[in-house]
Image (cartoon, rainbow, N blue to C red):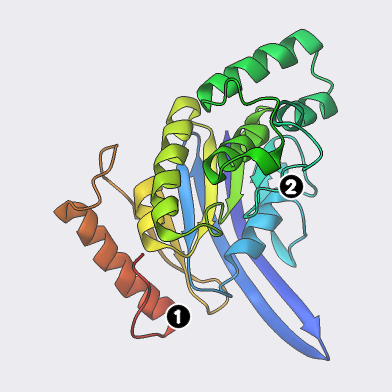
Amino acid sequence: MNLQIENISKVFFHADKVHTVLKNVSFRVQEGQFVSLLGPSGCGKTTLLTIIAGFQTSTGGQVLLNGQEVTKPGPDRGFVFQNYALFPWMTVRENILYPMKRQKMPRLEREARLDNLLTMAQLEGKEHLMPGQLSGGMKQRTAVIRALAGRPEVLLMDEPLGAVDFQMRQILQEELEALWLKDKTTVIMVTHDIDEAIFLSDRVIVMSAQEGEILEDLAVMLPRPRVRKSGLYQGYKEHLTELLQIAQGAKTVNLA
């Protein structure tokens, strides 16, 4: 897997005014990496993620996946939305099978893949429940394995834990990491949460509110599972806090 983001720019026009969200943003992602895009609101990180997904086009530059330019959504890129976007009229089983059926995966292969994913996400026995019957953690795990069901080369996640409270968020981060470690699919995740970025990521790409400029591409050299109270962990936290202050021009940021 080879993902290249090359000189991506995005310009919006409104009432004869030009608003540049992204300008010449470039980086590469290696196979199996967990990469977070971290930055203040309005820095263009979600816009960039949706361009990688093929949901919208860039004004300039290109996204290349295995040498092929991304121009539209495809099964090689799975997407997890902030609100999980599970089909409420489908069971857990039906939600997970949906992308496999769209890809016309043979029935026996679908069933074997379903069983494997349910086991990986610790959802055995829950497959006949509706989304409204699931806890927040179960919804999250269902959304992730549905996105993985079609064997995408890259999993894209847009603040997948943004809608939950602080205590639940830390629990779900641990569940998400455990799930990722079993599959090791390449991940790009958008977040504005410093702790979340450090806990989950191999790399943290810090984006500025000024046209999405990359302030730093930081490798997180911490063993897993990560200990939030360790001195090294706190050192990363302090460094990223300073970077975010630069990114948003603010004196304080939320360390949660």
Residue at 39%, 41% in the rendered image: 174
Residue 67 appears in the picture as rendered: no
Q: Residue 89 carries which label?
A: none
Rate crowding at label 1 as few (under 14), some (14 to 19) or many (20 or more) other CA atoms within 10 Å. some
Instruction: Look at the picture and state if 14 lies above or below 44.
Output: below
Check disc 2 and give the amino acid type: Val
Is there any visible trace of residue 141 in the rendered image?
yes
Tag 2 residue: 70
Residue most toward the left?
231
Residue 107's image quarter?
top right
Q: Specify the quadrant that holds the C terminus.
A: bottom left
Residue at coordinates 84% horizontally, 29% vertically from top-left?
102
Position of the N terminus by quadrant: top right
Q: 10 or 147, which lies in front?
A: 147
Please state if 122 lies on the left or on the right of 60 as rendered.
left
- Give the residue at x 73% y 63%: 58
Q: Which mark is residue 248?
A: 1
Farthest residue to the front: give it.
Answer: 133
Please provide percent x and percent y for residue 215: 42, 69
Q: In this view, does 178 lie to the left or right of 116?
A: left
Please tell me whether mark 1 sits on a helix, a strand or a loop.
Answer: helix
Circle 2 sits in a helix, a strand or a loop, which is it?
loop
Quadrant assignment, res 225: top left
Dot 1 amino acid type? Gln
In this view, which residue lies farthest toward the bottom? 16
Viewer-side residue, 253 vs 189: 253
